[in-house]
Image: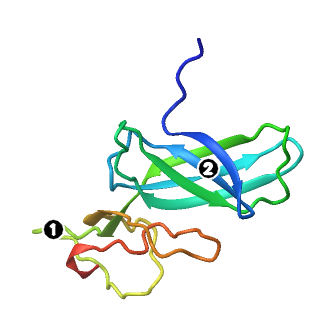
Amino acid sequence: MPPPPPRPYVTNVTLKNNQIVLTVKVDDYPPGEPLEISGHATQNNGAFAVFYDLQPVPGPNPDGTAYMYVKAPPSQEFKQGHDVTVVLRAARVWTTVLGEEQPEQGSTTVPGPQVQGEPAGEGVNWNTVKAVAYAGPSSTGHSGQTSAGSEASFPGGA
């Protein structure tokens, strides 16, 4: 008996309205959490479709399963009688805002002038965490793709 497939995984590929639609099982992720799904589907005849989407994980169905649907236009026609191979990446997405390292209180080192917009010099360090937030889905782009993090908000006006 083969080992169980890794989570998440694709359970179905369908051609619908000239789009490849992938059904992705996402039971292991918390509902509402943003999940970035990207990858490609190919056939050995040269057909492929590249996909990318950022969506919140849906709540589970009554049987405990949860699915996301990702679509992409194929490069050329997918053909019956040929297997489809899907390479999929699923990742939790968050954004961190880091500020420049500030001199320690009581330090005898006098920092040089800090002018906004100047190129950073060797050794500049950004290590002060100002905000951490999960990225949220944004409005749909040109081909149904979304941009990670475009609607994330950060406390402190950063």
User: Position of 138 compared to 9: left or right?
Assistant: left
- Look at 65% across and 72% down and name the residue there: 143
Q: Position of residue 150 (x, y in %)?
A: 43, 74
Residue that mark 2 sits on: 22
Image quarter in which the N terminus is found = top right
Q: Relative to the observer, which residue lies in front, 134 or 122?
A: 134
Q: Position of residue 81 (x, y in %)?
A: 85, 38
Q: Which mark is residue 144?
A: none
Mark 1 and mark 2: Cα distance apart in space = 57 Å
Select label 1 or label 2 by which is in front: 2
Image quarter in which the C terminus is found = bottom left
> Which picture quadrant has residue 114?
bottom left
User: Position of 91 compared to 9: left or right?
Assistant: left
Q: Amino acid at mark 1?
A: Ser
Q: In this view, which residue lies farthest toward the left?
A: 106
Q: Amino acid at mark 2?
A: Leu
Mark 1 lies on a secondary structure that is loop
- Look at 84% across and 38% down and name the residue there: 82
Q: Which mark is residue 107?
A: 1
Q: In this view, which residue lies farthest toward the front?
A: 62
- Look at 27% across and 77% down and name the residue there: 111
Circle 2 residues within 10 Å: few <14, some 14–19, many ≥20: many
Circle 1 residues within 10 Å: few <14, some 14–19, many ≥20: few
Q: Position of residue 115 (x, y in %)?
A: 36, 88
- Which of marks 2 and 1 precedes in the sequence? 2
